[in-house]
Amino acid sequence: EHWQRVLSLAQSANQSPVQIACCLGIHPWFVILQEKQIENHQDLSLQQQQQLSQAVSENIDQIVAIGECGIDVFKAKKNTIDDNELASNITLQQDFFDMQLALASQHNLPIIVHHCQSHHYILAQLKQYKLAKAGVIHAFSGSYQQAKDYIDLGFKLGVGGTITYPRARKTINAIQRLPLSSLVLETDAPAMPPID
């Protein structure tokens, strides 16, 4: 429901010195909420996937990537009542992610990837597609090996405020070992502010 606003914002910025590039996608949080709150979520899923495909095709000259999309196991665990419901939701998130990877491949666009406790799912799907224009792993948090796996697939790692958190030791150690050319700086404001 927000795609047109995103496109309008990017278009209006064309008349100012500030440039805004936009992406279109279906964030995994919406997939989680959809399954939980809507009885006919499978019909709606197909409809939303078709709407995204149409929106991308119609606005291909205005967008620079597909996303933010991916898999969020942490949020799914918080919003499900048992293991069966959790497994069902993760499968649904994988389906949405797969569809968006196919869309990125079809239109030769990069992808912006959301992850949370889901590197093993995401890497498996990314390895299947091997996108020509990989994209960004948004707000990367993970090990050195996971970072290398993404970089080997052509991805840049998004680094933002969370790198300043004391609990981010594993990610800090990984980032320190990587070349600067594999990193992009992100704000993700105001969601992940740096520690003062």
Image (cartoon, rainbow, N blue to C red):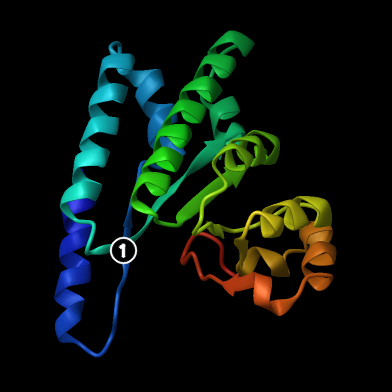
> What residue is drawn where x is 39% and y is 28%?
33
> What residue is drawn where x is 54% and y is 13%?
85
Which image quadrant for residue 121? top right
Could you tell me the amino acid type at mark 1? Cys
Local secondary structure at mark 1: strand
> What residue is drawn where x is 63% and y is 12%?
83
Compared across the picture, whether 18 is left or right of 183 comes to left
Front position in the image: 59 or 35? 59
Q: How many residues crowd around disc 1 within 10 Å: few (fewer than 14), some, or many (20 or more)?
A: some
Q: Residue furthest bottom?
A: 17
> What residue is drawn where x is 46% and y is 67%?
189
Compared across the picture, whether 160 is left or right of 52 comes to right
Q: Return the residue at label 1.
A: 22
Q: Position of residue 13 (x, y in %)?
A: 20, 78
Counting the numbered discs, the total is: 1
- Where's the C terminus, which quadrant? bottom right
Which image quadrant for residue 193? bottom right
